[in-house]
């Protein structure tokens, strides 16, 4: 294998592919990136067997071929190369030689035959989103996935695709986020109401890091057990999670007794202050909702904090407690300046909705007060 390419293009390809590389594996080959040189382009591939990432860059290919290089060493080497043209060459002994300006670097590679094939995904079922919309769908929900594997289906985000809407839902048993995107164009023409897939949170977190804040379209293809994201010159292939997702509509409260309108940033800053001395086991903070005020407080062996915030209140007064981290996660995902808090009582879930948007909803269970 022998090719020449620009240093920045090389770094982009390696930096994207390395996101699929396993950091913890008993298979040494999975700690590497496969380089495939073929017909005017070079492809970089990384996989941990659950997710596979491929990125293609333009190059002058003088000799076609494939080899696997140690991901960490190779990516660090490329990052530290000067600007300009880079020559990469491998020999029959799987030795890789990298030349840039006066730098000549040699590393030991591995035979690409041992590298697992990244599966192909049928392109029959698909829908399109822009990069910035998909980033929003991920950012506003993925933090709610379950971290434990006791219920594997909850470690992913449910994507429900309707004819003119894509809805993302994540929940972990303590909280839930629902975000929907309405489109003027149809996502599919078939005479069906919707279809659903559950994408692992880990996959979405890696995709989020690849996506850009722009309106270029990406295509999402899926089968019953795999999904492919085509993002410009990059492919991300992942398994889907199997099983039935929770009927999230059934757990949403229908009636509210108290509504509080508050500025998001003011509430966020108050909760951040209270969480500094919150009881560490569950980051407990308390709300006392009264006439025109919400009192935010925390109390632990570290100290005590009480702060009154002026708000608009409709309905009953109450006391209720929450895990402050769960509240902050949701508030940081909201872009609007004002939000409405919907309460039933001190033991039922709180619903948070941004004012001026019907697309986002966050639900959090309270912590029982002693």
Image (cartoon, rainbow, N blue to C red):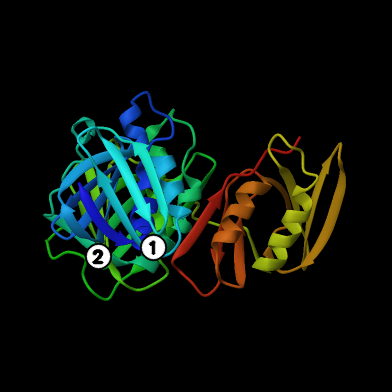
Q: Secondary structure at mark 1?
A: helix
Whether residue 313 appears in this view of the structure is: no
Q: Nearer the viewer, residue 278 or 370?
A: 278
Count residues near mark 1 (Cα–Cα under 10 Å), then give few for <14, some for 14-19, many for 20+: some
357 up-or-down from 240: above or below? below
Report x, y in % for residue 153.
36, 37
Report x, y in % for residue 290.
78, 61
Farthest top residue?
A: 26
Q: Nearer the viewer, residue 368 or 118?
A: 118
Count residues near mark 2 (Cα–Cα under 10 Å), then give few for <14, some for 14-19, many for 20+: some
At horizontal 43% and vertical 63% (from top left) the residue drawn is 136
- Is 194 left, or right, of 290 in this rendering? left
Name the residue beneath numbered marker 1.
Answer: 8
Quadrant location of residue 277? top right
228 up-or-down from 338: above or below? above
Name the residue beneath numbered marker 2.
Answer: 128
Q: Secondary structure at mark 2?
A: strand
Report x, y in % for residue 107.
37, 38
At horizontal 41% and vertical 31% (from top left) the residue drawn is 151
């Amino acid at each position: 294998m022998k090719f020449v390419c620009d240093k920045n293009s090389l770094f982009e390809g390696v930096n994207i592919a390395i996101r699929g590389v396993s950091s913890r594996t008993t298979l040494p080959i999975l700690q590497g990136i496969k380089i495939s040189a073929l017909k005017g382009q070079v492809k970089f591939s990384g996989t941990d067997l659950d997710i596979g990432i491929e990125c293609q860059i333009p190059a002058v290919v003088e000799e076609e071929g494939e080899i696997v290089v140690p991901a960490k060493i190779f990516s660090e080497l490329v990052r530290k190369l000067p600007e300009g043209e880079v020559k990469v060459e491998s020999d029959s002994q799987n030795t890789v030689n990298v030349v840039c300006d006066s730098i000549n670097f040699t590393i030991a590679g591995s035979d690409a035959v041992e590298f697992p094939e990244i599966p192909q995904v049928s392109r029959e079922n698909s829908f399109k989103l822009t990069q910035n919309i998909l980033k929003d769908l991920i950012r506003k929900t993925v933090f709610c996935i379950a971290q434990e594997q006791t219920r594997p289906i909850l470690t992913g985000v449910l994507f429900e695709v309707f004819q003119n809407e894509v809805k993302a839902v994540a929940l972990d048993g303590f909280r839930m986020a629902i975000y929907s995107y309405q489109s003027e164009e149809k996502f599919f023409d078939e005479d069906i109401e919707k279809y659903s897939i559950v994408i692992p949170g880990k996959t979405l977190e890696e995709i989020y890091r690849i996506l850009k804040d722009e309106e270029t379209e990406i295509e999402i293809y899926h089968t019953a057990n795999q999904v492919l994201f085509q993002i410009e010159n990059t492919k991300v292939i992942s398994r889907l999670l199997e099983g039935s997702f929770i009927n999230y509509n059934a757990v949403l409260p229908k009636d509210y007794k108290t509504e509080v309108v508050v500025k998001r940033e003011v509430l966020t800053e108050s909760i951040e202050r209270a969480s500094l001395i919150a009881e560490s086991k569950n980051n407990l903070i308390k709300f006392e909702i009264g006439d025109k005020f919400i009192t935010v407080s925390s109390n632990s062996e570290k100290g005590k904090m009480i702060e009154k915030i002026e708000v608009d209140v409709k309905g009953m007064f109450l006391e209720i407690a929450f895990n402050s981290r769960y509240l902050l996660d949701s508030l940081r995902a909201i872009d609007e300046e004002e939000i409405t808090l919907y309460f039933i009582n001190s033991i039922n879930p709180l619903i948070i909705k941004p004012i001026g948007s019907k697309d986002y909803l966050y639900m959090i269970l309270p912590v029982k007060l002693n």
